[in-house]
Amino acid sequence: MSLQEFVDPPRFEDYSEQFKDFFHMERRDDGVIWVQLHTLGGPVQLSVQNHRALGQMLKIVASDPKNELMILTGTGDEFMMDSDPEGFALEEEDLPYWAYEYAYKDGRINVSSLVNDFEIPTIGILNGHGFHSEIVLMCDITLMAEEARLYDLHYDISSVPGDGIHNAFQELLGTKRAAYALLTGEAIDAPTALEYGMVNEILPREALRERAFRIADHIMKQPRVTRRLTTQIIRRPWKRRVLEDLDGGFGIQMFGHLAKQASIHSKDHIAGNGTYVREGRRNNFD
């Protein structure tokens, strides 16, 4: 017998309770885990707190050997279109500290953890309009609601678009299309996202959950080692993109953030720059 015992892995019962204010979680007996982002039971309102919670949750879910496939989605008819009215008060009180802790460190962890820490297949669902769509676009398979539109708002709120969304857009769209999307805030509708290869399927919102579990059932038919090793093959392009571009993009964004010495996050800023998405316009200047 070994002189030491294994450290106990995380328990679903513990972390699903720990994160319940940020994520609704369900897990089937076969290890397929459903993770649904929310704020007070509705669509996510971005804040320092839930930005950090995302990376914490991803690392814990990835380290639980009983999880075999993750489905990640938002709540309601929007994915992420607003910010918490007081969600960036901490940043405004101490910008140098939180520019690193929240924006640089936590942001990098969110993206890199999804790509590097997970050794199980992932299915992302874009359930409605939203920014920070990279968290579902960088899953192995992505489904999108027919009426949903995705975009990157950073340039239009005077921020450098370098915090992970740019990675997803450049990898999936290519150089020219990504440049247009990042500079104009292009609202990409579901048929266009499918045409461009950003998502795999578009469906009515009410059909997304059932379809995701049907795909999960197909993936789960193969042995555990096959599933886990296959993820290491299909995720290699994302790993290269993260290794080569993620830290640099964040660093450039944070330099601009601190050079202005002003928080760029506010409810008016974020919600106001999503108006054209809800109105169905391609961008905010046409």
Image (tube, helix red, strand yellow):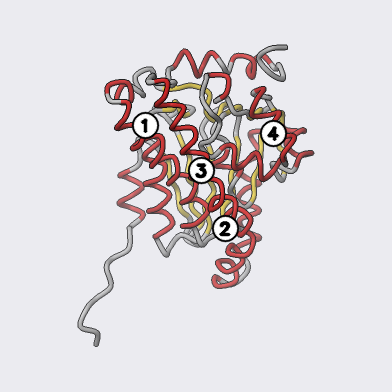
Q: Position of residue 262 (x, y in %)?
A: 39, 19
Query: In the image, what residue occupies the spot 40% across and 34% down?
Result: 103
Near mark 2 (Cα within 10 A), the count class, few <14, some 14-19 or many ≥20, is many
Which quarter of the rendering shows the C terminus? top right
What's the distance in space between the residues labelled 3 and 4, CA to CA?
37 Å
Direction from residue 196 to residue 213 in the image, left or right: left
Find residue 204 and name its label.
4
Q: Earlier in the sequence, mark 3 or mark 1?
A: 1
Q: Are marks 3 and 1 in contact (CB under 8 Å)?
A: no
- Amino acid residing under circle 4: Pro
**Cα gap from disc 2 to disc 3, whole angstroms:** 27 Å
Q: Amino acid at mark 1?
A: Ala
Q: Position of residue 56 (x, y in %)?
A: 37, 46
Residue 60 versus residue 52 in the image, above or below: below
Residue to which mark 2 is pinned: 121
Asked which secondary structure carries label 1, the reply is: helix
Q: Earlier in the sequence, mark 1 or mark 4?
A: 1
Q: Earlier in the sequence, mark 2 or mark 4?
A: 2
Which amino acid type corresponds to the residue marked 3 in the rendered image?
A: Gly
Give residue 34's position: percent from left, percent from top.
Answer: 49, 48
The residue lying at 33 percent from left, 52 percent from top is 13
Dot 4 alpha-carbon crowd within 10 angstroms: few under 14, some 14 to 19, many 20 or more: few
Image-based side of 191 in relation to 43, left or right: right
Circle 3 sits on which residue?
A: 248
Number of disc labels: 4
Q: Which tag, 3 or 4, sits closer to the chain's start? A: 4
* Left or right: 13, with 159 as reference point: left
Q: Which mark lies nearer to you, 2 or 3?
A: 3
Q: Secondary structure at mark 3?
A: helix
